[in-house]
Amino acid sequence: MMTAARSITLAFSVSMHALLLGGFIFLAKEAPNNAERVYRVALAEFAPAPNLPQTPPAVPDAPAPPPEPVPQKQEVQPPKPVQPKPDVKKISPKKSEAPVPKEAVAPAPPSPPAAPAGPQPRAMGGLSAYESDTLDQRPSVTRRVEPEYPNKARRMNIQGSVKVRLVVDSSGQPRHCEIISATPEGYFEDAALKAAQSMRFAPGKLKGQPVNTLVVLPFAFKLR
């Protein structure tokens, strides 16, 4: 038994050594070929590139010139024939021997008279007199007369007022005196007219000339 085991072990060891030896021999044969192959590859990588002929860059073709315009022929039209105008005789109508009556022209209406410039007088009791507001200088009182108080109104203790309108002529005299209002009526009218007729005035003036002027005089009747 011991002898058989040793024989198996020895045979296994010999076979292993034989395999190792065969492997080294195989590697030794393959090593030169591999080294030579690697060396050739390295030389091929660093070999200079061959000089290739350089091709010149392409030059673009110049654009073709535009075609020249073809001159157009102008058509010459023949002149139109001038047709002669026919002679036409004008026939004037015969004038009638009877005369044509002319239309009667109505006369233009007379233009209204132009209104005179400046203030205009008004008629007052047969006199032409100006309003005192339209004059350059109004009339003024040179002699004032106070009216007498009527006895009837005094006995009845009545008071009142009267307005008298008159014309102061160019000499300063009162003309055409008249009552325009009285309160109360029937008591003081006569006394007011008598006082107005006795007064004297400086006449009013228009453009430096004395003129007739309308004046209104108020009279007040009061008991003292």
Image: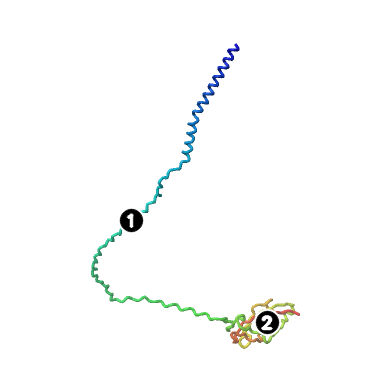
Q: In this rendered view, identify the residue nearer to me: 81 or 69.
A: 69
In the image as oriented, which residue stretches furthest toward the bottom? 171
| Residue highlighted by disc 1 | 67
> In this image, 142 relative to 73: left or right?
right
Q: Quadrant of residue 88?
A: bottom left
Asked if the residue under mark 2 is in contact with the one under mark 1, i.e. CB atoms within 8 Å, the reply is no
Q: What amino acid type is highlighted by mark number 2?
A: Ala
Q: Is residue 41 above or below residue 187?
A: above
Q: In this rendered view, identify the residue nearer to me: 186 or 65.
A: 65
Q: Quadrant of residue 7?
A: top right
Q: Nearer the viewer, mark 1 or mark 2?
A: 1
In the image as oriented, which residue stretches furthest toward the right? 224
From the top left corner, tell me how far across and down residue 210 is, in percent.
60, 87
From the top left corner, tell me how far across and down residue 162 is, in percent.
67, 79
> How many numbered marks are there?
2
> In this image, 196 relative to 79: left or right?
right
> Element at badge 2?
helix
Q: What amino acid type is highlighted by mark number 1?
A: Pro
From the top left corner, tell me how far across and down residue 191 is, in percent.
69, 82
Q: Residue at x 62, y 80 (%)?
A: 133
The residue carrying pointer 1 sits among few (fewer than 14), some (14 to 19) or many (20 or more) residues within 10 Å by Cα, namely few
**Residue 154: image tag:** none
Nearer-N-terminus badge (1/2): 1
The N terminus lies in quadrant: top right
Q: In this rendered view, identify the residue nearer to me: 73 or 5.
A: 5
> In this image, 200 relative to 33: left or right?
right
| Residue highlighted by disc 2 | 192
The C terminus lies in quadrant: bottom right
Q: Is residue 58 above or below residue 69?
A: above
Q: Residue at x 52, y 80 (%)?
A: 115
The residue carrying pointer 2 sits among few (fewer than 14), some (14 to 19) or many (20 or more) residues within 10 Å by Cα, namely many
